[in-house]
Image: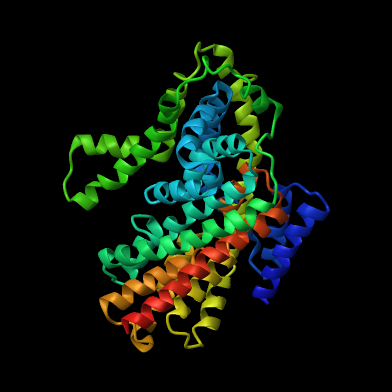
Amino acid sequence: MEILFLVLAVVMIIVLTTQLKIHPFLALFVVSILYGLFVGMPYQEIIQSINNGFGNTLGKIGLIIFLGVIIGAFLENTGGAYSIAEKVLKYIGSKRVPTALGIIGYIVSIPVFADSGFLLLHPLNKSLSKKAKISLAGSAVALGLGLLASHTLVPPTPGPIAAAGILDADLGLVIALGFPISLVALAAGIIYARKYAAKTYINPDQSDEIKEQMTVDSSDRPGALGSSIPILAPILLIVLKSVLNPDRLGWEHPLLEIIQFLGEPVIALLIGVFLCLLLPKKLDKQMLSATGWVGTAVKDAASIVLITGAGGIFGAILQNSGIAEVLGTTLTEYNLGIFLPFLLAAALKTAQGSSTVALITAASIILPMLPSLGFETDFDKALVVVALGAGSSVVSHANDSFFWVVTQMSGMDVRTGYRLFSVGTFVLGSTAAITIFLVSLIWT
């Protein structure tokens, strides 16, 4: 019944937002409560799930969204994003924008969370699409899939590392397998974005404010290198935090503590905001006011933040409803070989939204079954971790905060988001799973 109610909940969200034009925040909020009631969750647990789901989700990415949107506003209004777009297009060509963004997203998401990476790169995505005169849909889906590919398959992202730790898998082998398999999946995702998603036209010119920015005289625009610094500096700081982790290095130093502080996404993006103040030819305090660039950006971000928080509520309700145990019990009755960890993680991801939670939960469920399934060598365990990662990317939809970041920032409604991005995540994860199966055949 829990699975049936989950299907009905997803259908209800789609109908409310697309047919009845209800705001996604209200739709997600109401459906979350109804789902909890119908599956018999205690009232107090529903309330706790609402508070924790909203608070924990926004505690992680709420400020990041606001700061990322402010950086984007400065890049757009100063013409900086346009300068970057011109330079990038000069080297990659206008027909390869989705490919370039997919690759950039893949690299950025190895150390940076996918949500943060999309917000950091969205201004560049919009400007490149605008300059190339192509739909925002193809490039946004390619960027989202690129970010998701490395986020779920390539350590040092938290999910694969946690799963490797639970299964006692060799992290070096996980990286050695995850890297090429994720590249194959990424290639399939980029092809999907170029050949299918790009056919749905979404205009990159989403406001008059942006159109005015395009008329900024080239002599008043900051250069491509200077405009890149507010994006590159936060990414570099976050990467340094990951690489120079005292726990991993095994030694401590005051400088490492400073790097750990500066590399926190919120602090790194705040530094990016301060660097944006160098972009205007003449900085005017009006730009920072409630009615200026910052004020407008904050207002635009408010809706995204609310919807993302509501997605967190839906995910928390599902996690606490016990549906993970139901799916785990159902799937483990079948001997599906290397497809079992993939399907288990995919079911958990689709049910509760978080790739990291799906990876950790599925790894915990499958751990005692490894000997009976024949996964006993270091190679087998590493392959299982990568299979779990592939499953944790299938399918991103309404209960996943990343789904709302991608769709709302890119101007997609819920139905379009399901048709383009959710299907894209299925293509990404399924391609990875098939590649893993072929690798297992070759190895054995």
Q: Quadrant of the N terminus?
A: bottom right
State the image coordinates of residue 421 (x, y, percent, origin top left). 61, 56
Above or below 5: residue 206: above
Residue 271 visible, this angle? no
Residue at image coords 71%, 49% = 413
**11 displayed left or right of 235:** right
Residue 311 visible, this angle? yes
**290 displayed left or right of 377:** right
Residue at image coords 49%, 65% = 392
Above or below 381: residue 25: above
Nearer-the-camera pick, 124 or 165 = 124
Q: Quadrant of the C terminus?
A: bottom left
State the image coordinates of residue 403 (x, y, percent, origin top left). 59, 53
Above or below 444: residue 117: above
Nearer-the-camera pick, 158 or 99 = 99
Nearer-the-camera pick, 127 or 68 = 127
- Can you tell which quarter of the image residue 293 is in? top right
Residue at image coords 50%, 50% = 99
**259 displayed left or right of 200:** left
Of all residues shown, which one is farthest toward the right?
Answer: 20
Residue at image coords 56%, 65% = 427
State the image coordinates of residue 312 (x, y, percent, origin top left). 58, 53
Q: How is the image coloured?
A: rainbow
Above or below 3: residue 86: above
State the image coordinates of residue 183 (x, y, percent, origin top left). 41, 60
